[in-house]
Amino acid sequence: MTTEERILNFYDRRTLIETAAELLTPLTFLTSTFFKTIKEFATESVDLDMYKGRRQTGAYVKRRAQGQDVGKIGFETNSFTPPYLKPKVTITPGDLRKRVPGESLFSDGNLANQAQQYIASQIDRLDKDIIVRNIEIQAMEALYNGAVTARDENGNVLATVAYGRDAALVYTLGTKWDSTADKLDDALAAQLLIQEKSGFLADFALLPRDVVKYWKADQNIQRAVSKDWSSRGELAYDLREQGGIWLGMVDGIDYWTYNEFYSNLANSGTVEALIPAKKVLFASTKAEASQSYGAIELVDQNMGARAIDMYPCKDPSGVTVQVHSAPLLIPHHINAYAVVRVLA
């Protein structure tokens, strides 16, 4: 671009089209798929009753003999403390005087309205770009690691919430998927193991990008896969809008892939792929899981998924906008998920 082309000629009529901002809006495929229930608490910790079912059979008795006492199904109450988020941004009068992307070059004089719009945009950014992204990271950790880890800005661990998944549900295959492994048989084995441990039938598999090419290259899979999206039946919503890419269905299992990235505080903030490489997640979408939100540390609002706080700053003058949230994503049936390493 030449110097003459960079000069803005105010005497020519111009049209300011809608801004083309580079928005890195977080995707919510995992949260939208598994953690659809939202629960809010007025306490710092959240409690979950977990029932311990048994595959019990009834003993036959003689007609006039005493009946069998089968006992009661017990449960245990687990208490979890959600980690706390409160991102903030300080807005100064100078920020309010600046034109935001897409705004007219000339002010209409309504500075109060412009200030409200600017503050609203900052609140929206704190919520969607930070809190929503953290919640999706929690979803990944809960499903893949069986635990959620909260870290400070330096990557130090503040708290870890572990859900106690059966160790047998995290394993490595002997024959890897980049060879002649029977991938469909491996999937059915994982499905059977989940059913044994939890009582749920796995209907979902998530493949990372490095595994997808081997899955697609398998001729047995391509002969068996159904790619007719219109036959989804019970799937009343299209998860592709949240970032998921549907690969097809085989043996009652929907295969997906999903690409998202995040700043990993455990690795000095390096941007990494959200979905772990070399591993396939098998799961049941019928297993209950929830987004649970603990109490908010505000006097005028102590409960809710989000709370907005604004307070003035002096010298220099400004206002700090802060969004509070205490989210914890909890799988109620932790054994309904298996993580299988399929590549070396």
Image (cartoon, rainbow, N blue to C red):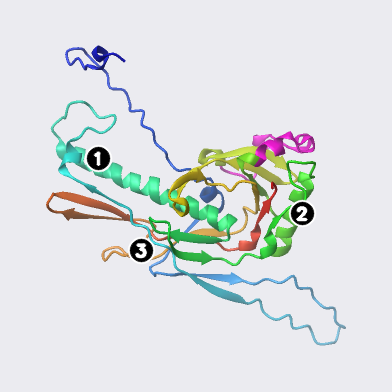
Image marks 2 and 3: residues in contact by CB distance under 8 Å: no
Does residue 226 belong to the magenta stretch?
A: yes
Give the CA separation, mark 1 to mark 3: 26 Å
Numbered badge on residue 74: none
Mark sitting earlier along the chain (2/3) = 2
Which residue corresponds to mark 1? Answer: 117
Does residue 304 belong to the magenta stretch?
A: no
Q: Which residues are magenta?
A: 211-238
Residue 169's spot in the image, x, y percent? Answer: 68, 60
In the rendered image, the quadrant that contains the N terminus is top left
Above or below, comparing residue 40 to residue 71 in the picture: above
Above or below, comparing residue 82 to residue 272 in the picture: below
User: Please, what is the three-letter code of the amino acid marked with disc 1?
Assistant: Gln
Which residue corresponds to mark 2? Answer: 189
Q: Nearer the viewer, residue 27 or 260?
A: 260
Residue 269's spot in the image, x, y percent? Answer: 43, 48
User: Please, what is the three-letter code of the amino acid marked with disc 2?
Assistant: Ala
Which residue corresponds to mark 3? Answer: 303
Q: Nearer the viewer, residue 174 or 286?
A: 174
Disc 2 secondary structure class: helix
